Amino acid sequence: MNLIKLEANRRTALFSWLFVCVLVAACITLGVFQYRWISAVSVTAREHMSVGLRANLARVSRDFNNEIATAANVLARFPRARDGEARDGR
Protein backbone atom coordinates (compact mmCIF):
# COMPACT_ATOMS: atom_id res chain seq x y z
CA MET A 1 0.00 0.00 0.00
CA ASN A 2 2.86 2.37 0.79
CA LEU A 3 4.37 1.63 -2.59
CA ILE A 4 1.15 2.70 -4.31
CA LYS A 5 1.04 5.95 -2.30
CA LEU A 6 4.68 6.61 -3.12
CA GLU A 7 4.02 6.10 -6.83
CA ALA A 8 0.95 8.35 -6.67
CA ASN A 9 2.98 11.04 -4.89
CA ARG A 10 5.68 10.79 -7.56
CA ARG A 11 3.09 11.23 -10.32
CA THR A 12 1.55 14.18 -8.52
CA ALA A 13 4.97 15.78 -8.05
CA LEU A 14 5.87 15.13 -11.69
CA PHE A 15 2.62 16.66 -12.92
CA SER A 16 3.06 19.60 -10.56
CA TRP A 17 6.57 20.29 -11.86
CA LEU A 18 5.42 19.79 -15.43
CA PHE A 19 2.58 22.26 -14.85
CA VAL A 20 4.98 24.80 -13.32
CA CYS A 21 7.35 24.41 -16.31
CA VAL A 22 4.46 24.93 -18.75
CA LEU A 23 3.39 28.05 -16.84
CA VAL A 24 6.95 29.44 -16.89
CA ALA A 25 7.23 28.75 -20.63
CA ALA A 26 3.85 30.43 -21.21
CA CYS A 27 4.91 33.49 -19.20
CA ILE A 28 8.18 33.78 -21.13
CA THR A 29 6.37 33.42 -24.46
CA LEU A 30 3.76 36.01 -23.50
CA GLY A 31 6.53 38.34 -22.30
CA VAL A 32 8.28 38.10 -25.66
CA PHE A 33 5.02 38.74 -27.52
CA GLN A 34 4.23 41.70 -25.27
CA TYR A 35 7.67 43.19 -25.88
CA ARG A 36 7.20 42.88 -29.65
CA TRP A 37 3.68 44.29 -29.54
CA ILE A 38 4.73 47.24 -27.42
CA SER A 39 7.55 47.91 -29.86
CA ALA A 40 5.15 47.77 -32.82
CA VAL A 41 2.68 50.07 -31.05
CA SER A 42 5.49 52.49 -30.26
CA VAL A 43 6.61 52.61 -33.89
CA THR A 44 3.03 53.12 -35.06
CA ALA A 45 2.46 55.90 -32.52
CA ARG A 46 5.70 57.60 -33.56
CA GLU A 47 4.68 57.46 -37.23
CA HIS A 48 1.22 58.80 -36.37
CA MET A 49 2.69 61.69 -34.39
CA SER A 50 5.16 62.42 -37.19
CA VAL A 51 2.34 62.61 -39.74
CA GLY A 52 0.37 64.88 -37.41
CA LEU A 53 3.41 67.09 -36.88
CA ARG A 54 4.00 67.40 -40.61
CA ALA A 55 0.35 68.32 -41.18
CA ASN A 56 0.41 70.92 -38.40
CA LEU A 57 3.67 72.41 -39.68
CA ALA A 58 2.22 72.61 -43.19
CA ARG A 59 -0.85 74.39 -41.78
CA VAL A 60 1.27 76.84 -39.80
CA SER A 61 3.42 77.50 -42.86
CA ARG A 62 0.35 78.06 -45.02
CA ASP A 63 -1.20 80.40 -42.43
CA PHE A 64 2.06 82.32 -42.07
CA ASN A 65 2.36 82.68 -45.85
CA ASN A 66 -1.23 83.92 -46.03
CA GLU A 67 -0.56 86.51 -43.33
CA ILE A 68 2.58 87.73 -45.10
CA ALA A 69 0.74 87.87 -48.43
CA THR A 70 -2.12 89.83 -46.85
CA ALA A 71 0.31 92.29 -45.27
CA ALA A 72 2.17 92.67 -48.57
CA ASN A 73 -1.11 93.37 -50.39
CA VAL A 74 -2.08 96.01 -47.86
CA LEU A 75 1.31 97.66 -48.16
CA ALA A 76 1.17 97.48 -51.96
CA ARG A 77 -2.05 99.55 -51.99
CA PHE A 78 -0.34 102.63 -50.59
CA PRO A 79 1.31 104.88 -53.17
CA ARG A 80 5.06 104.90 -53.05
CA ALA A 81 6.69 107.95 -51.62
CA ARG A 82 9.45 109.46 -53.64
CA ASP A 83 12.85 109.44 -52.06
CA GLY A 84 12.90 113.15 -51.41
CA GLU A 85 9.35 113.23 -50.00
CA ALA A 86 10.00 110.44 -47.60
CA ARG A 87 13.04 112.17 -46.10
CA ASP A 88 11.68 115.70 -46.04
CA GLY A 89 8.26 114.76 -44.75
CA ARG A 90 6.44 116.59 -47.61
Image (cartoon, rainbow, N blue to C red):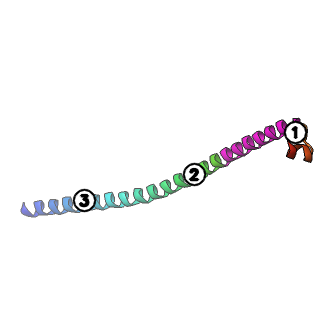
Task: State which quarter of the image contains the N terminus.
Answer: bottom left
Q: CA distance from mark 2 to mark 1?
A: 47 Å
Mark 3 or 1, which is nearer the eye? 1
Question: Residue 54's x, y, as percent?
Answer: 67, 49
> Element under label 1?
helix
Mark found first going from the N terminus, 3 or 2: 3
Name the quadrant containing residue 82: top right
Q: Which residue is mark 3?
A: 15
29 and 66: which one is in front?
Answer: 66
Q: Amino acid at mark 2?
A: Thr
The 10 Å Cα crowd at callout 2, few under 14, some 14 to 19, many 20 or more, is few
Where 6 sits versus 85, above or below? below
> Element under label 2?
helix
Q: Amino acid at mark 3?
A: Phe
Q: CA distance from mark 3 to mark 2?
A: 43 Å
- In the displayed structure, does residue 7 sit left or right of residue 68? left
Q: Which residue is mark 2?
A: 44
Residue interval drawn in magenta: 54-78
